[in-house]
Image: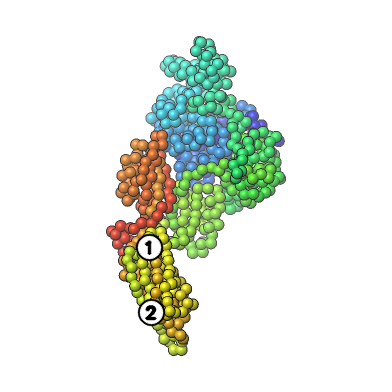
Amino acid sequence: MRRYTTENLRDIILISHAGAGKTSLGEAMLFNAKATSRLGKVLEGTSVLDFEPEEQKRQSSVFSAMHNFKWKNKGVLLLDTPGDANFSSEAILGLKSSDNAIFVIDAIDSIKPHTENLWNMAKEDGLTRTCFVNKMDRERADFDQVLADIAEIFETKALPLTIPIGKEDAFQGVVDVLRKKAYLFEKNGSGSFKEADVPGDMADLLEETYAKVIEDLAEVDDALMEKYLEGGELSSAELASALTAGVLKGNFLPVFAGSALLNMGVQPLMDFIVTSLPSPKDRAMPELKNAEGKTRPIKPEESEPFVGYVFKTMSDPYTGKLSMIRCLSGTLNPDSSVYNASRSVKERVGSIITLEGKTTKPLDQVGPGDIFAVAKLKETKTGDTLLSDTLDMTLPSPKFPEASMNMAISPKAKGDEDKIMPALQKLMEEDPVLKVYRDEQTGEFIISGLGQLHIELTVDRLKRRYNVEVELKPPKVPYKETITATAKVQGKYKKQTGGHGQYGDVQIEVSPKERGEGFEFENAIVGGVIPRQYIPAVEKGIMEAMKEGPLTGNPVVDFKVSLFYGSYHEVDSSEMAFKIAGSMAFKKAMEECRPILLEPIMNITIMVPEECMGDVMGDLNSRRGKIEGMTAKGKYQELKATIPQAEVLMYAPDLTSMTSGRGTFSLSFSHYEQVPYNIQEKLVAEAKAAREGK
């Protein structure tokens, strides 16, 4: 039997920028509903939602956390997400598993850039959106400014359903706009309040706000609007119906005021969640789709086949892997099996559990809207689709931001080389944005993330979970070398040590090729001056020598070698001798062919607010970037440019600083280009010093 029926279930996700008070709001809800016995506090390390060591150390959410509570005979599944952009994948996946987004806005700092990004994602995913203006008890709290910013930044109507009584130290509670009642709260975190008449000095504000709210609600339905315009009074039932319909349509943004930390103004929001937000049955579901583009609708009914979406993977060295799943349709029982349509494998489901912070409880059955966990699914990963039927149809894959920062990673202890990759593989299963790969040219292991904090916390988890300590440093740039002139040279290897000696003699012409054309070897020997069996050895010697150019020890590219003459000895010649001769000839040629250094040039696409364009363009020019075009995208500008890779190794924090966190960028390889001579001289000197230091 299920905990809650689908009709009586509400899935909510708490979302905003870091520090706005999402976790504190979640803790207040859980405490008010008696799901917890005390009001957890992030700063005191008593939060049930921020329980990971990294979160307690930072006093801020790093991972999504789940809990649930019962309020007025309705079940609420709550997902608390981190607000730092370094961990945005947690919020992106959370949006795929929820129906209703509660935006927590700081009454002091208002709407920050990352909240704006999350708003757009929630809108695109079709979630209802509600706002809780937090920290009304703090100095410089400004409820009116937040309402103005909602209209300007979110481009939607703010519908204040509660308004604050006082602010800063004088904050006492809230006024319920539709009921025209005041709720005066205790300031001890208990959530206790008494109902009272609206303060006299707020009468005019209440009437003004009430009139505007009624007008906005009437606009939801033509019949209501007609009644309103004719002077008729809208009943409570009509207003409640209009509120629910308007929330579903996204006609406005319901706004509540309060202080999560003091547990003031939270209960009216909780009442709204269970009375006005939609159940999973009321939302449009995504469609299943196969490789040919055929679709199949999903109905959130228990009688339908089971469809589940894996939105998060948790890995622990002791308990193993946990897959967090949102049920979209059908039911699932313990000790059953499902088909992973994303990987075309069957998976065995053992026990089904719910997470309440870091604790777990078993479930007898899950159905549409339920969010639950299954342990030890062997092949299943984040983003997979699970079905009761063997169908090759999957749900749409989420789009994640591209990793924008790379660091070279190496073990501190020599014996830990073999531990790094298995541990990182497990962390990558949890975090789909995190990438680790080996750079073939530099030989370094590269870890890619959304920012410095993202990578640093990954390193912390490596140490805590898997006892692997690593060092981070900026990655080496994969420079290459090439030539700009043609030369004819001889390479002759002759060695006599008694008995058979070694003899190989080659003459080659080395000439440059166009950029990107690679290496070409031409056998131009005539008359058998070098026997055919030794020709491949010459090429092999050159190919080995070209791995380390004379300038910086980087590979040599884009040149042609023509083997046109040489000599051999019937007794002393060998493949090894001709291989060494080829290598000697190539190294000699490089001294005469005027080698230059090439650097990788990247395509960079930057999305920035219009007012930041000047700073970003000036910075790109200082980094040797070449701007190729700009396109307006609403309030943002999309800037496309090419830029040397060496100039953007640590670009992520700089762009964040220039744009107050609103800028994003992506990189892709474009081509190789000559390094300016002044920079080449510096790089050659550094490489020489490094070689001599060894």
Question: Residue furthest toward the bottom?
Answer: 498
- Pinpoint residue 303: horizontal percent, then vertical percent: 70, 34
Residue 414 vs residue 45, the one in the foreground:
414
**Which part of the image, by quadrant, shows the C terminus?**
bottom left
Q: What colour-coding does the image apply?
A: rainbow
Q: Measure the C-alpha gap from mark 1 to mark 2.
A: 26 Å
The three-letter amino acid code for the residue at tag 2 is Lys
Residue 269 vs residue 332, the one in the foreground:
332
The three-letter amino acid code for the residue at tag 1 is Lys
Q: How many C-alpha atoms fall within 10 Å of the one at disc 1: few (<14), some, or many (≥20)?
A: some
User: Which secondary structure lies at badge 2?
Assistant: strand
Q: Which residue is mark 2?
A: 492
Q: Which residue is mark 1?
A: 513
Q: Tell me the quarter of the picture where residue 331 sits.
A: top right
Whether 661 is drawn above or below 182: the answer is: below
- Pinpoint residue 324: horizontal percent, then vertical percent: 60, 43
Whether 98 is drawn above or below 529: the answer is: above
Q: Name the residue: 62% across, 49% down.
A: 343
Camera sees residue 28: no
Left or right of residue 129: residue 589 = left
Whether 249 is drawn above or below 297: the answer is: above
